[in-house]
Amino acid sequence: MRLTRRRLLVSGLGLGGALVLGHVLRAPRDLLGDATVLPGAADEHALNAWLRIASDGRVTVAVPRAEMGQGVYTALPMLVAEELDVPWSAVAVEQAPVAKVYGNVVAVVASLPLDDEDDGALAATGRYALERAARALGVQATGGSTSVRDAWLTMRSAGAAVRDMLLRAAAARLGVPVAELTTADGAVLHAASGRRVDYGALAAEAALLPPPDPIVCKPRAAWRLLGTPASRLDTAGKCDGSAVFGIDARAPDMLHAAIRIAPAGGGTPRAVDEAALKRQPGVVAVVTLPDAVAVVAQSWWQAERALESAPPSFARGEVGLDSTDAVFAAYAQALDAGDTQTYESLGDASAALAGNAETIAAEYRAPFLAHACMEPMNCTAKVDAERAEIWCGNQAPDLLRLIAARALDLSQEAVTLHTPLLGGGFGRRIEPDVMLRALAIARALPGRTIKLIYSREQDMQHDSYRPAALSRFRARLSAEGRIVAWENLIASPAVTRAVLQRAFPGLPLLGFERTNVEGAAWLPYRIPDRRVAHAVCDVPLAVGFWRSVGHSHNAYFTECFMDELARAAGQDPLEFRLAHLAADSRAWRVLTRLAEVSDWRAQLPAGVARGLALHESFGSMVAQCAEVEVRDDDVHVRRVVCVVDCGTVVNPAIVTAQMESGILFGLSAALRGEAVFGDGAISTRNFADYRLVTLADAPRIEVHIEPSDAPPGGVGEPGTPPIAPAVANALLALDGRPRRRLPLSLGA
């Protein structure tokens, strides 16, 4: 697909209308930023917005992305430390403050609904315009597996600039040319005289110097830290209990709140027995919100027990969801009516498929999914007439601060938002709902610090869910068994639009967005006639970002259909895919490597089968092979082999961990994940009925990293999309029956 003027305009509107396009012509940010945004202790000197150096040589790196287990508190400081030439043991990390210099440019640019391989003039113009807009807006979001990709140039430049400043400061102090100096292990060295000056002794002088222009980063051959499995900086605190998550927030005389939210959307409190609630031990106040009732007590358990003893009742409202079947019926109706937007069109797939008796068709479904973060949603807040202070694990501190300021009718400067560690995010903690409810409760008790925690049941039943999706395929094979025509029609809500409209009601947005078709359009397979289109179908339920977003279901749809086509062609699934890939392309290399390391062609015991899937997402190519058997009428995944090409690797241990994490996360969803509805509300309540893969269930996982000199790709999410189709395809190989619905089961 080539970018048209209309598509460029729509792309901009899809990301926030005039908010984005109106900033295109403004000057971009200075990559290094102003050192004043990073204040420190008396013995520390900030040399730009990204790092401080203490008198003892300790280097503190500001990380502008939320640490939710994906390793940004390690990978991003490694970029600085490599260029700065400091020992890893001398590096510390802290959460960056809210400032535009920390905006995530890559996340905005990557949201364009374009083929990443499209390098035409209009596509380049669209990317350039959004990059300028992103730098001006400075949205400080964590998501889309963009943390390392966005920091790759910026944070290396920050370290390289400071190294140059330290060299010049040392040259002035020692009275020698800069060319005679080198750096190593946190010091400037003068080999001719044997003199050494530690960075800590030079920091104050270096801070007075301007950064170099241009900034020169090290060549790859000079790296000593990047590409190594450096120890994680957040591990020790998580092991000894000193790590602070949102749920760990503490303040003197803090009160605790539990909550009951209307079960169905649009519901309101109907009957609240305040007297009974206030008679319970420790209860301080009862706060009625438009859609919920909260009890504030001396402890959370007291507040929760009070609500259990005298539960409020709610009027149902008018936007409840009757059943998942009703949702899929509406999806099917939209596709039947042809109410779709085309994202990719090459050749004439419709004509190639029309009236052809050899057309192969299939329809797939994926259910609503909860996030099920291990740390339930929580927020601690203190509000008075002039200021607010908030402690909340979040994935977009600048946006949440803006939303909080508007809700409280305060200036943004009057709102302080702390971003602690996140006990799981997966897109859930970009939502402001728990913060807004905490602020409303705290506003009712001005001057008191209130910690609101959702119970697991409230968390599970009031999520922003991964939307259900319906996908229809039609394809035709040549006599040689090649795909000559491919059409894919998808129906689901537009996730980005839903998230932004909840956060900023009234914001003009269209449903034309990349998340609708990511993982379905712009596949690496060579197919002469192809079309991918999407129908935006709104649902009366909050839907939101979920780990890998559209890729999470579209990879399942496309890769399962590829196996069905391979079977129709009478070909091995791996050979069938290779035949549709350009020789020695990135996808071809990853798939070829998978064949080797997974023993794809080796004989398996009776009752065991292999399935594979290939998928590109967030700048990384991943192929996975699953070995599956059926025991005791249940699906058991014995072994998963993963090959990933994520470009240049910052820390291979983090890449491996994230591939393993993504596989297990996706496997839970593939085998068991479904948010079930009943009587207009989510009936799923806890892990007893939203089961996860446990240690006993977990397969043996092998991760192989394909060497690459390309810029870094993402790793937090790309491991998730291929696992569901890999398992489904193994089941197809086992008994010949395609699995066209998730979660997977023998009867599906």
Image (cartoon, rainbow, N blue to C red):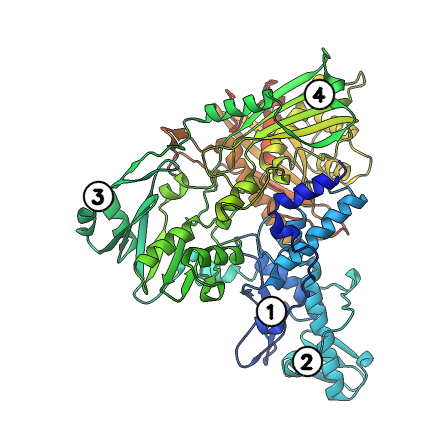
Q: CA distance from mark 1 to mark 4?
A: 56 Å
| Mark-to-mark CA distance, 1 and 2 | 22 Å
Secondary structure, mark 2, is helix
Task: Look at mark 3 in the image and give the residue it sits on.
Answer: 309
In the rendered structure, which amino acid carries the disc numbered 2? Ala
Residue at image mark 4: 475
Q: Residue at x 64, y 26 (%)?
A: 489
Q: Position of residue 127 (x, y in %)?
A: 72, 49
Q: Residue at position x 57%, y 24% from top? A: 334
- Compared across the picture, whether 281 is left or right of 469 comes to left
Tell me, yes or no, whether the two marked residues, 3 and 2, touch with CB atoms within 8 Å.
Answer: no
Q: CA distance from mark 3 to mark 4?
A: 58 Å
Closer to the N terminus: mark 3 or mark 2?
Answer: 2
Q: Amino acid at mark 1?
A: Ser
| Residue type highlighted by circle 3 | Ser
- Location of mark 1 (residue): 89
Image quadrant holding the N terminus, namely: top right
Picture disc at residue 105: none
Answer with mark 2 or mark 4, whichever residue precedes in sequence.
2
Mark 4 Cα shell of 10 Å, populated few (<14), some (14-19), many (≥20): many
Residue 349 drawn above or below residue 74 = above
In the rendered image, residue 608, in percent from the top left (x then y), is placed at: 59, 25
> Which quadrant holds residue 349?
top right
Q: Earlier in the sequence, mark 1 or mark 2?
A: 1
Q: Nearer the viewer, residue 437 or 209?
A: 437
